[in-house]
Image (spheres, grey):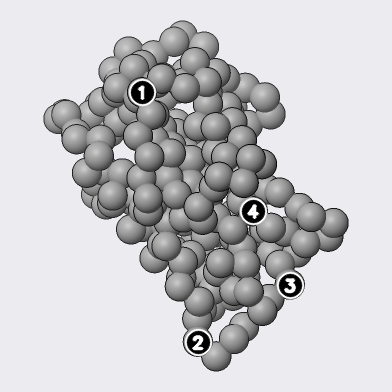
Amino acid sequence: MSPATPIVILGAPLIELSTIDSTNIYAMAQIKEGLAKSGSCFRADYQTHGKGQHGRVWESTQGQNLLCSYILELKEVDSLKNWSPKDQIGFSAAIALGIRAFFDAYTNGDTKIKRPNDIYWRDRKAGGILIENILRGTEWTWSVIGIGININQTQFSPEAPNPVSLKQITGRDWEILSLQASLSKALNHSLQDWLKNGDSTTLYQLDQHIIELDHQ
């Protein structure tokens, strides 16, 4: 760790997309085509092929939820560090902690993390995370952080695993763009904590918020 903690800025610029196959697919293509700016956030109103863990589809009603992908070039965080796959463990934990803190601030508690990358409110799924990384040889170069969080949707597919939205929890509608800004702030704060305090502290903090649900 360098003496001065590097500064991470996620969420700028914010690129608005109406309908897209998947924000992760779009973000990955931007990187591969050399068009990506580190820190960018791609937000969509609707995804035709939203990506979940293990090839699952993320189901979402148009304009009702927070669907986005952030991209980060690791050399922009610290150009002197040799970023490797082992650094992804603490990074993933920091991302999950940031999203949990964001959602928990609006629900006044009961927000947990279900391994590997799900956000739960009590025993119901509120969101998911899909992080996809790019390596050049043994060096970790880019990360695409895909996030889907149920905000205003109240009707879900019967196949969805016990879902819940922020509206169902709080009884009110929410403005998506305002929440997007709050999410970016929470992620930046959590990543700064990880860079400052290291993996062991971050993983310990993660363990404090884990929920085990054998039936889901």
The x and y percentages for residue 122 are 39, 38
**Quadrant, the C terminus:** top right
User: Label 2 amino acid?
Assistant: Ala
Q: Which mark is residue 82?
A: 3
Q: Do the numbered discs 2 and 3 sit on residues whose CB atoms are within 8 Å?
A: no
Q: Measure the C-alpha gap from mark 1 to mark 3.
A: 37 Å
- Where 160 falls versus 34 (above or below)? above
For residue 126, which quarter of the picture? top left
At x 45% / y 49%, what residue is drawn?
40
Graded by Cα atoms within 10 Å as few (under 14), some (14 to 19) or many (20 or more), the crowding at tag 4 reads many
The location of residue 91, given as percent across then percent down, is: 59, 60
Q: Which residue is mark 4?
A: 142
- The CA span between labels 4 and 1 is 25 Å
- Of mark 4 and mark 1, the one earlier in the sequence is 1
Residue type at mark 4 is Trp
Residue shown at 62% from the left, 83% from the top? 1
| Circle 3: residue type | Asn
Element under label 1? strand
